[in-house]
């Protein structure tokens, strides 16, 4: 036995020697980052606002940082130059999404557009959504609808102003954007009473909040099945309610087939489902509902969040509010309301909107990317299946790109060619590259139009005589990052019509 063991040991040693001789292993240089603890990694370093925590860590470890979150290798990207490397130079390598518990529980197993893995299904669904809802032609065709719905809000606010009452502006803007998305995507509005006792909008918001809550199953995949936080159970309950609501919308469209003069997004998807042989990707009823849920979530959160922050900063900085109102008076006058066709010449409005997107990107951490293969980025080894997080909140505060970056100063964009469309990486609130937000143009149009109307038609004061300087600007982390507390204000009508 001793002889056999000696022979095996000698052969093994020889094999290892030959292996290292002909296939030398080089130590892979990962990006710098905190060492972390065994098993848990650096999860203990993150609090309620991880975009701020990642920003602080990046000051120590650099704009490309490696951090272990549980068992998941994660790369945090925190500068414009680094973001360009991941979203442009190596865009294809990082074009996929990780499979998260929220996507499995809420989005029909990654069949939605936002979290679908990179491949034929995602490419074709994105193309369909862009053509049928988010193209410039489609956006322009919905212009009368946007004018009508915003007009209803303005009339309501005029009545509030007449009665010298207060209004929850956050809630009203959220209702407006949700109604607009429902009209554009589904052909009609849906009220709170049409889903369950929690209300239509509250149920969707609950689903979004659950999806944004850190799930231990995403950091320790082997314990996902045990659902120790009961998050999956809660998501399944919300999903059941939403699924019933989405089923009803699909059935309404099937019953109305042939009676409609114009087709909405649901009609188009149902037609595609009936012609599977003509497509190279699978679309079924669950895929349709997943895309519908995407549209609802995006419609409720992103534009409403940005408008809420914009109104907050303008109220907090009355001299900037006054400059914007002066531009509107000069270009529009006090005898008419703003039309969408007026937006193009409102230069100060565009600067205000850019500054809000810089300071308050709707998603402070862009939805995570996943590397499809090993890659070298800026000399660092990025392993396959790494999770990539782009901290656009930190990028908007990068001192190499912005002077006095924490200050709200729209005039920093005077004579600046920087825009928000993904070409200038110091300002990428909608992301960039293949996974950039397809609803960017619709979002920009909604934010500019609603903000222009609210500022042109009304002066705004805080309730209870609170000074503007004391307005609470605390944010709440989630898939989007809205105000922690709703904006409660008093409008005063200022037009002559």
Image: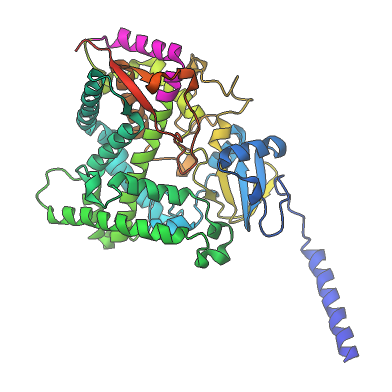
On screen, residue 326 versus residue 260, left or right, reads right
Say which of 197 and 41 sits in front.
Answer: 197
Is 446 colored magenta in this rendering?
A: no
Q: Quadrant of the C terminus?
A: top left
Which residue appears at 45% of the width and 55% of the height?
102
- Find the residue positioned furthest to the bottom: 1
On screen, residue 2 versus residue 178, left or right, reads right
| Residue 167 falls in image quadrant | top left
The answer to whether residue 495 of the structure is visible from this angle is yes
Tag count in the figure?
Answer: 0
Colour scheme of this structure image? rainbow
Where is residue 421 drawn, in percent x and y?
A: 44, 31
Which residue appears at 86% of the width and 80% of the height?
9
Q: Magenta region's main secondary structure?
A: helix
Give above or below for 298 relative to 250. Answer: above
Q: Quadrant of the N terminus?
A: bottom right
Say which of 19 and 110 sits in front.
Answer: 110
Say which of 416 and 123 sits in front.
Answer: 416
Where is residue 203 drawn, in percent x and y?
A: 33, 49
The answer to whether residue 351 of the structure is visible from this angle is no
Give above or below for 355 relative to 372. Answer: above
Numbered range of the magenta stretch: 311-334
Where is residue 39 drawn, in percent x and y?
A: 67, 60
Which residue appears at 54% of the width and 35% of the height?
392
Where is residue 117 drawn, in percent x and y?
A: 46, 55
- Find the residue positioned furthest to the front: 464
């Amino acid at each position: 036995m001793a002889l056999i063991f000696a022979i095996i040991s000698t052969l093994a040693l020889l094999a290892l020697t030959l292996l290292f001789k002909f296939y030398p292993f080089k130590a892979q240089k990962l990006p710098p980052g905190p060492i972390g603890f065994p098993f848990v990694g650096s999860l203990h370093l993150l609090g309620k606002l991880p975009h701020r925590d990642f920003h602080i860590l990046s000051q120590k470890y650099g704009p490309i940082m490696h951090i272990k979150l549980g068992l998941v290798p994660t790369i945090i990207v925190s500068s414009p130059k680094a973001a360009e490397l991941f979203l442009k130079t190596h865009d294809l390598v990082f074009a996929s999404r990780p499979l998260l518990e929220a996507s499995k529980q809420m989005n029909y197993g990654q069949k939605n557009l936002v979290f679908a893995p990179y491949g034929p299904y995602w490419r074709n669904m994105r193309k369909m959504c862009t053509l049928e809802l988010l193209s410039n032609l489609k956006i322009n065709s919905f212009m009368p609808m946007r004018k009508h719905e915003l007009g209803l809000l303005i009339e309501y606010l005029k009545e509030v102003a007449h009665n010298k009452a207060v209004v929850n502006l956050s809630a009203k803007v959220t209702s407006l954007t949700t109604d607009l998305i429902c009209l554009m995507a589904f052909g009609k509005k849906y009220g709170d009473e049409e889903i369950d006792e929690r209300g239509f909008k509250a149920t969707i918001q609950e689903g979004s909040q659950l999806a944004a809550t850190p799930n231990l199953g995403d950091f320790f995949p082997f314990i996902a099945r045990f659902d120790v936080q009961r998050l999956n159970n809660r998501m399944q309950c919300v999903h059941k309610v939403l699924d019933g609501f989405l089923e009803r919308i699909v059935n309404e469209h099937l019953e109305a087939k042939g009676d409609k003069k114009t087709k909405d997004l649901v009609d188009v998807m149902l037609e595609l489902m009936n012609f599977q042989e003509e497509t190279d990707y699978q679309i079924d009823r669950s895929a349709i509902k997943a895309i519908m849920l995407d549209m609802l979530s995006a419609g409720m959160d992103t534009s409403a969040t940005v408008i809420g922050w914009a109104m907050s900063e303008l109220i907090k900085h009355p001299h900037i509010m006054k400059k914007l109102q002066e531009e509107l008076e000069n270009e529009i006058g006090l005898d008419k309301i703003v039309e969408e066709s007026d937006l193009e010449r409102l230069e100060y409005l565009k600067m205000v909107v850019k500054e809000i997107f810089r300071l308050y990107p709707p998603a402070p951490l862009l939805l995570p990317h996943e590397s499809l293969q090993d890659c070298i980025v800026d000399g660092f080894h990025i392993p396959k299946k790494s999770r990539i997080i782009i901290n656009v909140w930190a990028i908007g505060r990068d001192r190499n790109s912005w002077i006095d970056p924490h200050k709200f100063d729209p005039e920093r964009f005077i004579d600046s060619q920087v825009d928000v469309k993904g070409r200038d990486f110091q300002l990428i609130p909608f992301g960039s590259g293949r996974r950039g937000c397809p609803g960017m143009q619709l979002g920009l149009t909604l934010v500019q139009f609603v903000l222009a109307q609210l500022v042109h038609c009304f002066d705004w004061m805080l309730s209870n005589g609170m000074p503007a300087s004391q307005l609470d600007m605390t944010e709440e982390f989630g898939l989007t990052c809205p105000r922690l507390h709703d904006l409660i204000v008093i409008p005063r009508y200022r037009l002559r019509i």
